[in-house]
Amino acid sequence: MKFFVDTADTKEIRELADTGLVDGVTTNPSLVQKSGREFLDVVKEICSIVPGPVSAEVVALDHEGMMKEAEVLRKIADNVTIKVPLTIDGLKTCKALTEDGTMVNVTLCFSANQALLAAKAGATFISPFVGRLDDIGQDGMDLIADIRLIYDNYDYDTEILVASIRHPLHVLQAAKIGGDVMTAPPKVIKQLFNHPLTDKGLESFLADWKKTGQTIG
């Protein structure tokens, strides 16, 4: 499973990238707004940190407007992935961009039928939002399972990018189902490291080492 970090905070991206865990980055207008910086500057810096796909979202709602914005965004770097909404105009834009060799992330997916449409439009990634489905009383992971089944039935190349991840259990469930990618905030990715037995074991080892009176080096 590929790990994308869902943030526009370049400091946190650098910190996680140093671990070798980051395969890509997803951003959106809300995340950029939180950063307090210029959108294009943020995307350019992120692309210089992470060699993998960096999703940058268009804000136009019509096909022509999306194409104009995409033209600006994809000039930033070769690893820019254009993020478009799952609408008719969004899928028209997806088809046009992928046919021109540009990676496209179709976002705001909430049904398997929508995911099927995105795959037929040639999407590089489909982003189903599991956390937001959980919020309204549905099981977001059921959607991931349905998309996985449909894509496998027809050998679609579109990668399932599990989004709106709220906690480590979402990561585990997505990996077991076969999600290709997960994108999560830095806080959630860091939580994956944590286990009380790891902390307890390390504490015990260090205490025993201290008793030896030795040093390394």
Image: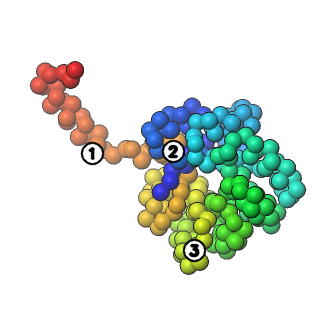
Label 2 residue SS: loop
Q: CA distance from mark 1 to mark 3?
A: 41 Å
Q: Which residue is mark 1?
A: 197
The outermost residue toward the front is 100
62 or 184, which is in the foreground? 62
Precedes in sequence: disc 1 or disc 3? 3
Quarter of the image for residue 78 reads top right
- Which numbered circle lies on residue 147? none
Do callouts 1 and 3 mark residues in contact (Cβ within 8 Å)?
Answer: no
Name the mark nearer the viewer: 2 or 3.
3
**Dot 1 crowding, Cα within 10 Å, few <14, some 14–19, many 20+:** few
The residues tagged by marks 2 and 3 sit, at their Cα atoms, a distance apart of 26 Å
- Residue 57 is at least partly visible in this image: yes
Give the mark toward the camera: 1 or 2: 2
Point out residue 158 in the picture as x, y percentages from the top left corner: 61, 65
Q: Nearer the viewer, mark 1 or mark 3?
A: 3
Residue visible at 88% across and 56% down?
64
Left of 29 or right of it: where is 175?
A: left
Residue type, mark 1 in image: Leu
Residue of label 3: 155
Residue shown at 39% from the left, 44% from the top:
193
- Badge 3 amino acid: Asp
**Measured from the top left, where is residue 25 in percent x and y?**
60, 46
Q: Is residue 146 above or below residue 80?
A: below
x, y percent for residue 191: 43, 45
Left/right of residue 26 with respect to residue 95 in the rendered view:
left
